[in-house]
Image (cartoon, rainbow, N blue to C red):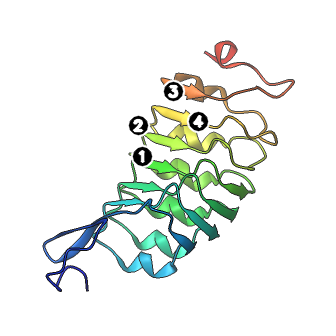
Amino acid sequence: DPCASGVVWTGLTCSAGAVVEMLINQGMTGTVPPSLGCLASLVDLRLHINSLTGSIPPELRTMSALDNFHVGANSLTGPIPSELGCMTALTGLYLRQNSLTGSIPTELGSLGGLKQLYLDGTSISGAVPEALCAAAALTQLQIDNNPGLGCYPSCLSSVSSLTAGTVPEGCPTYQDAA
């Protein structure tokens, strides 16, 4: 237990005997361990700019206190787990610049406090789900550089910082949707 050992661990912050922050972007390799889901008090998980591979474990859904989940700029693959929609404290979700596939889970719309969603530079496809409109706090959405991504719902035109990139043929532009 890094919080009980009295030894300072680089990249970890403890509070009240629990790990609350993990900031590791120093050439880390391997996969995102499902056991991170056991860190119920973790508020900030930043594993970006590493060489992580494999999929995002659905077991992370139990991280009920997690505010920021940042795994951008890795080599993660597979679909975005719908279970991320269970992380009710989440305000920032950064999955950008990975090789993620599939569609955007509709469950992300249930994250009422989600302010920032970065899915740019992945390989996601399909239409942007209308369920995202329910994420009322959403102010930053980046979905550009996803050639397989289809149309988006017009309700997202109210997002103040929206970067969609090239709009697929036949879809309205954000200005048309406003």
User: Mark 3 highlights which residue?
Assistant: 159
Query: Marks 1 and 3: in contact by CB < 8 Å?
Result: no
Which residue is nearer to you in this view: 61 or 34?
34
Quarter holding the C terminus?
top right
Which residue is at 39% across, 69% downward?
63
Residues at marks 2 and 1, CA–CA distance in whole angstroms: 6 Å
At label 3, which amino acid type do we have?
Val
C-beta proximity under 8 Å, tags 2 and 1: yes
- Among numbered discs 2 and 1, the one appearing first in the sequence: 1
**CB under 8 Å between discs 2 and 4:** no
Disc nearest the viewer among 1 and 4: 4
Residue drawn at (86%, 23%) of the image: 170
* C-alpha gap between disc 4 and disc 3: 10 Å
Disc 4 secondary structure class: strand
Lateral position of residue 125 relative to residue 79, left or right: right
**Spot occupied by residue 53 in the image (x, y as percentages of width and height):** 64, 69
Residue type for callout 1: Gly
N-terminal-most mark, 4 or 3: 4
**Figure check: 171 above or below 19:** above
The residue beneath circle 1 is 112
As helix, strand or loop, the secondary structure at mark 1 comes to loop
Measured Cα–Cα span from mark 1 to mark 4 = 18 Å
Which circle's residue, 3 or 1, is located before the other in the chain? 1
Numbered badge on residue 142? 4
Task: Identify the image quadrant of residue 43.
Answer: bottom left
Mark 1: give few (<14), some (14-19) or many (20+) Cα within 10 Å.
some
Type of the residue with mark 4: Gln
Residue 43 shows up from this direction: yes
- Label 3 crowding class (10 Å Cα cut-off): few <14, some 14-19, many 20+? some
Image spot of residue 99 (x, y percent): 71, 56
Query: Which of the two discs, 3 and 1, sits closer to the camera?
Result: 3
Mark closest to the chain's N terminus, 2 or 4: 2
